[in-house]
Image (cartoon, coloured by chain):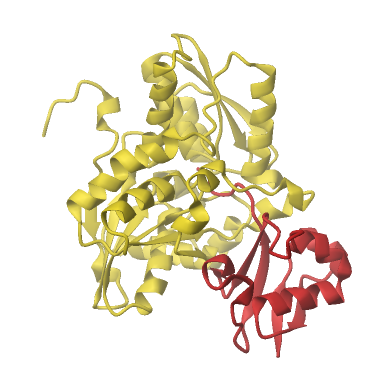
Amino acid sequence: MALYHSVLDLIGDTPLVDVSALSPNPGVRILAKLEGQNPGGSVKDRAAKAMVEEAEKEGRLVPGSVVLESSSGNTGIALAMICRIKGYRLTVVLPENVSVERRQLLEVWGADIVSSPGAEGSNGALRLAQGLAAEHPDWLFPYQYGNPANPKAHYEGTGPEIWRDCPEVTHFVAGLGTAGTLMGVGRFLKERNPNVQLWAVEPPAGEMVDGLRNLDEGFVPPVFIDNDGPALLDRKLIVRARESIEWTRRLSDVGVFAGISSGSAMAAAAKGAHQLDEGVLVVLAADGGWKYLSTGAWTADLDDVVDRATRLIYF
Amino acid sequence: MSVSVRLPTILRPQAGGLSEISAEGGTVGEIVDDVVRQFPGTASHLKAPDGGLHRFVNVYLNDEDVRYLGGLETPVPAGAQLSIVPAVAGGGG
C-alpha cells in the first residue's frame, strides 16, 4: 500500500495475472494484463492522460479550456475523469448505440455528450467531431487515432511493465482500435526481443460497416500508419461476437471480470495457442466488466446476447 | 477450385444484391480477380491502381487478414471462406 497524491498517479502499473487455467494447450501460458484496474476503468486512462499532459506542456490548455473527443466509450470516460480533476471541460461525440453505462459514466464526470448516428459507428462519431473541431479552433481535439502521445503512453508505460513482469513473453495479443496499444507495446517489446510476435484482434465490423456510404469513407488510423503498423504486426484476426462473449464468460471462471473486447483477445489467444508448441502469451484485458452488465453478457441466453451485440457497440 | 466469398453491404449493389458468392482460384489474388470478372462494378472497390488490394479493404481468409499471411499470393485451401471487409474506425474505445 502507498499514499498517492492524486488519482492521476494511480494510472498504469496494472497487474499481470496468470490465466493459464484457460489455455487449451498445456505448453502455452496465457497471462492477462488487467487494464480495468486503472482508476477510470480502462486502458484508455493511459493515452488520455498522456494526450492531455502533452497538450499542457505545449501550452494548449489553460484552466476552463474545452477538450473534444470522439469515442465509443473508454477514451471519453478516461478524458472525462482527467478533465474533471484538472479543471477542463469535455465534449464527447458518442455513437447513440453504445451501452448505457458508458453514457452514465460520462455523466458522472460531467462531460457534455453529443450523439452521433448509431449506424455510422465510430467513423460517424469521428466525422462529427472533426466538424466540431473545425468550428471551434480554440478547443483541444486530442484525436486519439492520430496523436503520437497515444502509442507513446504504451511505449513508455504498458510495454516496460510487461517486460519487467514477464521478460519471457513470446506473444502480445490486443485489440486494434486506434492501434495505440499495439504500436507502443509492440515497438517496445520487439526492441527488447525481436522474436516477440504481435497479434492484433478485430471485432467483426457488423453494422459499423453497413453505415458506410462508400468505400472511400474507410479509415486506417494514422497511429497505425505512422508506426509502420503493417510491418510491425505479425498477425491480424477477426473474432466473432459469439466467441468473444464465450471467452468473456470463461474469464470469469478464473475470477477475471473483464469487458467483451478482453473476451475477443482471449479467444484469439486460445485459437493461436492451439497452433504453438510452447509460448507465453500476454493478453491485454482492456477494461472491466462493469460497463457491460446491462448487456446480460454473463447471464442472459448466449443467442440473445450475440443478437444484441450486432446492434450495440460492445467493443 | 471454388470457394465462398462474403461481400460487405457496400459491394452488394455491384454484385446483383448478393451477400455471398462463389469464385474460382487457388490464391487470394486469383479469387479476387474472379470476383472482379464476374462483377466488373466491384473492380475499383477491391483493387488499387497498382494491382494490390484497395487500402480500405481487408480480406480475411477464415478470419485471418491476408495482408499478414501471404497477401494476394496466399494459397486458399478447399472449403475456405473469404470475407471482404471495409476498413473502418472500429473499436477505437
Q: Camera-side residue: A297 or A68?
A: A68
How many circles with numbers are drawn on the protein?
Answer: 0
Residue most extreme to the front: B50
Quadrant location of the N terminus of chain B in the rendered image: bottom right
Percent position (x, y) of residue A35? 33, 45
Compared to A273, does A30 lie above or below? above
**Left or right position of A295 against A274:** right
Picture residue at 66% right of the left edge, 29% below the top: A130
Compared to B68, does A122 lie above or below? above
Q: Camera-side residue: B77 or A83?
A: B77
**Left or right position of A55 against A164:** right
Percent position (x, y) of residue A136? 65, 16
Compared to A168, does A92 lie above or below? above
Residue most extreme to the left: A1
Compared to A230, does B92 lie above or below? above
Residue most extreme to the top: A63
Report the chain shown in yellow: A
Is residue A41 something one can see in this rendering? no
Quarter of the view holding residue A133: top right
Q: Camera-side residue: B81 or A36?
A: B81
Percent position (x, y) of residue A257? 33, 53
Picture residue at 56% right of the left edge, 62% below the top: A306
Quarter of the view holding residue A19: bottom left
Chain B, colour shown: red
**Left or right position of A282 against A58:** left
Is residue A151 something one can see in this rendering? yes
Picture residue at 69% right of the left edge, 64% below the top: B52
Percent position (x, y) of residue A37? 29, 42
